[in-house]
Amino acid sequence: MQPWFDPQQYAWIPGTSFGCAAVILGALAFWLVPQGRAKAFIVRSWFALWIVAVVFVGAGGFAWVDGQPWGVWYGLALPGVVGVGVLGIDLLVILKRYHAVEVASQSAPQT
């Protein structure tokens, strides 16, 4: 069985790329969610990144079943498993914060 890629040189790329995208989106969410801005963009982007994590889990599982070396399947599965858990929970927090901002803006006195 030929490895899909050289794990000694390239196993860091999926996790690093995914982590960088998550940090950038997390920073945007940290900035925009408390203001109640860009809800559609943040929620859709967050969900899309969560789907990427699910794909990483699937690819890692397929690589494991296919008999790929440890560095190949682990390099794909680790960012997926962490992303599914962290992004899934954080999406619920983001939706709750947007809801709280909407409720606060509706109950605020109009001047």
Image (spheres, grey):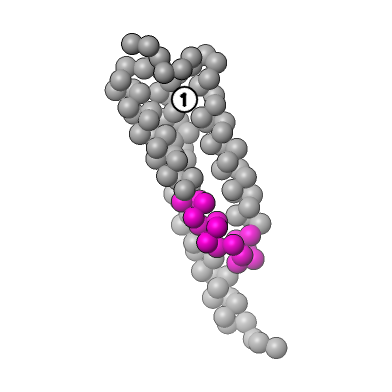
- Report the front residue among 4 and 31: 4
Q: Which part of the image, by quadrant, shows the C terminus?
A: bottom right
- Which residues fall within the magenta stretch? 32-47
Predominant secondary structure, magenta span: helix
Spot occupied by residue 17 in the image (x, y as percentages of width and height): 56, 33
Q: Which part of the image, by quadrant, shows the N terminus?
A: top left
Q: Is residue 94 left or right of residue 69?
A: right
Spot occupied by residue 108 in the image (x, y as percentages of width and height): 62, 82
The residue lying at 62 percent from left, 45 percent from top is 24
The residue lying at 50 percent from left, 57 percent from top is 43
Q: Is residue 2 left or right of residue 6?
A: left
Query: Residue 56, relative to residue 37: is it above or below?
Result: above
Decide if residue 29 is in sight here.
yes
Spot occupied by residue 84 in the image (x, y as percentages of width and height): 43, 42
Query: Residue 25, relative to residue 38: is it above or below?
Result: above
Query: Residue 15, relative to residue 100: is it above or below?
Result: above
Magenta region includes residue 38: yes
Residue hosting label 1 = 75
- Locate residue 13: give its quadrant: top right
Binning the other alpha carbons within 10 Å of mark 1 as few (below 14), some (14 to 19) or many (20 upward) gives many
* Residue farthest toward the bottom in the current orientation of the protein: 111
- Locate residue 30: give its quadrant: bottom right
Total numbered labels: 1
Query: Residue 10, relative to residue 88: is it above or below?
Result: above
Q: Secondary structure at mark 1?
A: helix
The residue lying at 33 percent from left, 22 percent from top is 64
Question: Disc 1 marks which amino acid?
Answer: Gly
Spot occupied by residue 7 in the image (x, y as percentages of width and height): 48, 16
- Report the front residue among 46 and 86: 46
